[in-house]
Amino acid sequence: MATQRQLFELAGADDRRFSPYCWRTRMALAHKGLEVETVPCRFTEIPERVAFANHSRVPVLRDGDTALGDSWSIACYLEDSYPDRPSLFGDAGGRRFAQFFNGWVDLTVNPPLAAAIIPDVYDIVDPVDRDYFRTTREKRFGKPLAALRADREAHLARFRAVLQPARLLLAEAAYLGGAAPLYPDYALFGTLQWARCSSPAAPLEAGDPLSDWCERMLDLHDAEGRSALAAA
């Protein structure tokens, strides 16, 4: 019998799951201990596959009769719908911090990493998606993918620099959430998992405290993060 809970998530060639936002949701579901069937979607088939949710992007979660998109909205839904399961936020104040942190990752952390690894993402998307991906990303960044690749080290330097607030938090605890992971950990982990699954470039320098944290994150929930196909 098919599970009633499905997560529609982005997939590339070789069924590679690399979306940072889908990883946020996958880790949130694992945190709550909720079983889910993952449904792979290529870029060009997403609008049709998730039209039932009135959404055009993934992740999309179908949970019984409920269907919704957007990783942050899904996290809030899981917290409110499964209050007897481990909390993603800790308390009301924790939810507000998580919302701020989620926005900080979206607006400050992800852009320089995207500029660094988008040419590598092109290499791992399904071949049927490559024309779409190149056209939309070159329009977004205003330059060819080859030019982004040439500036990779500068983009990675910017990415590493903006992570300093997270390093300061991790100097005092094992996780951004404190002694145990909370949703801010999953928001930032999704970004580093995006790089791990998409690009051979090292997003962090050797000895970065975030590297140890990332290893802990990969081991969580029966090593859910390590199950992903990583870039060579």
Image (cartoon, helix red, strand yellow):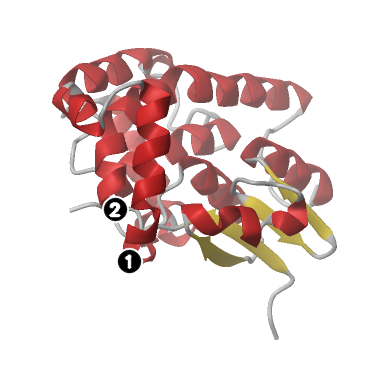
Front in this rendered view, residue 119 or 71: 119
The crowding category of the residue bearing disc 2, from other C-alpha atoms within 10 Å (few below 14, some 14 to 19, many at least 20), is many
Q: Which residue is mark 1?
A: 14
- Mark count: 2
Q: Is 148 left, or right, of 213 in this rendering?
A: left
Residue 124 image label: 2
Does residue 87 appear anywhere in the picture?
no
Identify the mark at residue 31; answer none if there is no mark.
none
Q: Tell me the crowding category of disc 1: few under 14, some 14 to 19, or many 20 or more residues within 10 angstroms, Cα based.
A: few
Q: Is residue 99 above or below residue 180?
A: above
Image quarter in which the N terminus is found: bottom right
Relative to 223, 215 lies left or right: left
Q: Position of residue 220 (x, y in %)?
A: 45, 51
Specify whether residue 139 is in view: yes
Q: Secondary structure at mark 1?
A: helix
Q: Position of residue 156 (x, y in %)?
A: 24, 23
In the picture, residue 169 is in which quadrant? top left
Numbered disc 2: secondary structure: helix
Residue drawn at x 67%, y 57% is 50
> Which residue is found at the position 52% from the left and 34% from the top?
187
Say which label, 1 or 2, has the lower sequence index.
1
- Decide which of 166, 122 is in the foreground and name it: 122
* Residue occupying image coordinates x 74% and y 39%: 76
Which residue is more in the foreground, 173 or 141? 141
Instruction: Look at the numbered discs 1 and 2 and tell me whether their residues touch, using CB distance below 8 Å.
Output: yes
Q: Is residue 212 left or right of residue 135?
A: left
Task: Tell me if 152 is positioned left or right of 218 in this view.
Answer: left
Badge 1 amino acid: Asp
Q: Position of residue 136 (x, y in %)?
A: 43, 36
Amino acid found under the numbered disc labelled 2: Ile
User: Disc 1 versus disc 2: distance between alpha carbons?
Assistant: 8 Å
